[in-house]
Amino acid sequence: MFFLLSLCMCGLLLRGDAQDRAALWRGNDRSGRCQYTFTVPSPVEASCPQTGGPEVEGLKARLSLLEVLVSQLSGGDTGGHQGARARAQSELQEALNRVMGERNLLQGEKERLEGELEGLQRRMEEMRRETERLRNRPCPPQTPAVPPSLPLQGSALMRPAGDSAWQHGSPGFQELKAEVTEVPAPDGSEDNTGCGELVSVGEPVTHRKADNIEGKYGVWMQDPEAVSPYGPNMFWRIDTIGSDVRKLFGYEDMEQLSKGFPSKVLLLPEQVESTGATLYRGSLYFQRRRSRTLIRYDLASESIAARRDLPHAGFHGQFPYSWGGYTDIDLAVDEQGLWAVYSTVKVRGAIVISQLDPYSLEVKKSWETNIRKNSVANSFIICGKLYTVASYTAPDTVINYMYDTETSQGKAMAIPFKNKHRYNSMIDYNLAQRKLFAWDNFHMVSYDLRLGRQQAN
Ligand code: CA
């Protein structure tokens, strides 16, 4: 019994000793809840390793590293080195975007050229079949090629009626024999204030080269009757390569155009087709892409003032000039107002000239010529007379034909004309300066003109 009592006392004494060295705390934690902490010393270790040992130091180092990384990612560090890296990255991105943009443009141009190639192959096949058909046709009885009563115009000329194979399959197109046509020799009868026939065209003067691929083809213009807020010295330009041609650049004068510093950039509400646009009385006139719709865009209010379909006009590669480029509808301005040069299915590709109401775009009067539109490179109108250019690539070509709307008569001619840069995509009469404006393979060029004296009626 005594032994058992002694054992219990020892146990209580030992327990009491342990309680002396243990500790219990009670307090609130951060969220306010009651928290108990019970601490018992280790019966084995005499002391703990130093507080804040290698593990804590390692954690601190990793934390600092993470802070630096977070700072870099959030752009907080604008130090010289980081800034330079960011700038280099942004420049690289910009260059990449530019290259991608140009690649897309070239891709679009490639597709367009492939489309044109297909069209040309189709036309060649049609012509081959036509030739075959004519070969198999029995010869008609021989008749004199030129009736004695048929007067020759100039010294040479078009094939007389009945002489040509064209008669069998086409609506009597004239074959342009420009090389044998004589031009009236200048005899001191030029009068640049009048409206006589074109006598000669001067050397091309280059004013500006386009900055990138978008400007391989284009149109540049001057309003002969400029309207406020734009002055009469203003020049305008549209680069026409690309799938979304809408930008109209305005330049204060020729010097600014030559330097490439536009003072105004307008974003047109509709896409422009090809190089046939023109300016007149404060409005830009252009053909809406993939349509026969003509649009009058008012420069002052920067909005569309009129839109109207050009009746029956071919568009988007149906009746282009010989270089293609969707040049189906060519607009022009001269002393007599606004004109459209185009073709229709009814006249099977011959050039039709229509005088338009510049306010409403309605057709006032039309003339049908017998010149095949895709046989000429371009055309321009001076004093109601349409002139056509034979080639868009030959450095030395000719203005090979003239049609006078006043007399409804046409004739072949051969006035020398130079395609200095060998790919002329636009030629127009500029009434403000009485010059020709052209867009020749990235280059904006102009030509002086000489007109003959107007013939008295
Ligand atoms: Ca033209």
Image (tube, rainbow, N blue to C red):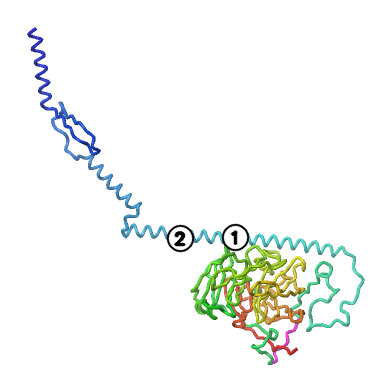
Figure quadrant of the N terminus: top left
Q: Nearer the viewer, residue 162 or 393?
A: 162
In the figure, is residue 345 to the left or right of 138?
A: left
Give the structural element (helix, strand or loop) at label 2.
Answer: helix
Task: Give the mark nearest the N terminus, 2 or 1.
Answer: 2
In the image, farthest residue toward the bottom: 188
- Ligand 1 has an atom within 8 Å of the beta carbon of the residue at disc 2: no
Tell me which amino acid carries mark 2: Glu
In the figure, is residue 5 to the left or right of 112?
A: left
In the figure, is residue 259 to the left or right of 398?
A: left
Vertical arrangement, residue 184 with respect to residue 112, above or below = below
User: Badge 1: few (under 14), some or many (20 or more) residues near its Cα, within 10 Å?
Assistant: some
Quadrant assignment for ligand 1 = bottom right
Residue 397 on image: x %, y %: 68, 77
Tell me which amino acid carries mark 1: Gly
Q: Nearer the viewer, residue 97 or 337?
A: 337
Q: Nearer the viewer, residue 97 or 283?
A: 283
- In magenta, the rendered stretch is 181-187
**Mark drawn on residue 94:** 2
Mark 1 = which residue? Answer: 108
